[in-house]
Image: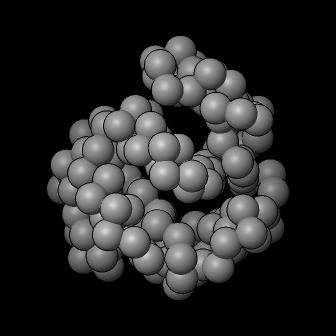
């Protein structure tokens, strides 16, 4: 997971916000990544689904079009029962940023080691870690 995930997740949960994952990975690969990347390394997450986990998990298996098409984010928002314009997307790729913006969502880019040199100009904000998203959520929709 991206740096600062624990802080962002804990803050979102403490405020009663819904949390989802929308990944370009296939379903089996995403579940493996969640178990190894989040559950094993994040004290904040105790289960992939249900209490303490994610309210929605969407993979490439759940959509017919792929990023930068907005379908994956629109499906995820629908699963959450949240209007797209009330969602924040946290992305580490330019295609993910484009997908979030194409969905009508606000997007925070948190570049990773491999994408830090890319142009994230479409993002609403470019941050150094997921923890830096917390003040954006605190500001409200």
Q: Is residue 77 left or right of residue 64?
A: left
Residue 37 % position (x, y): 51, 25
Using the rendered view, name the quadrant where residue 47 is placed: top right
Q: In this view, does 44 lie above or below 18?
A: above
The x, y position of residue 82, in whole percent, is 67, 72
Residue 29 lies in what quarter of the image? top right
Q: In which quarter of the image is the N terminus?
A: top left
The image position of residue 137, as x and y in percent, is: 38, 62
Location of residue 26 with respect to 42 vertically, above or below: below
Residue 87 visible in rendering = yes
Which colour assignment does the render follow?
Answer: one colour
The residue lying furthest to the front in this view is: 15
Task: Name the residue at 40% across, 72% down.
Answer: 140
Q: In this view, does 92 lie to the left or right of 118?
A: right
Seen at 72% across and 50% down, the residue is: 56
Query: Residue drawn 32% across and 69% down?
Result: 139
Does residue 68 appear left or right of residue 3 in this picture?
right
């Amino acid at each position: 997971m991206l740096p600062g995930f624990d802080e962002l997740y804990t803050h979102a949960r403490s405020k009663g916000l819904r949390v989802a994952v929308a990944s370009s990975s296939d379903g089996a690969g995403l579940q493996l990544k969640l178990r190894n990347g989040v559950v094993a390394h994040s004290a904040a997450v105790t289960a992939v689904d249900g209490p303490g986990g994610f309210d929605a998990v969407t993979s490439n298996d759940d959509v017919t079009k792929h990023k930068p098409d907005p379908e994956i984010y629109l499906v995820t928002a629908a699963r959450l029962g949240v209007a797209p314009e009330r969602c924040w997307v946290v992305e580490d790729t330019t295609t993910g940023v484009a997908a979030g913006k194409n969905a009508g969502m606000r997007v925070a880019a948190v570049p990773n080691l491999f994408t830090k040199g890319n142009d994230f100009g479409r993002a609403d904000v470019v941050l150094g870690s997921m923890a830096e998203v917390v003040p954006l959520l605190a500001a409200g929709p």
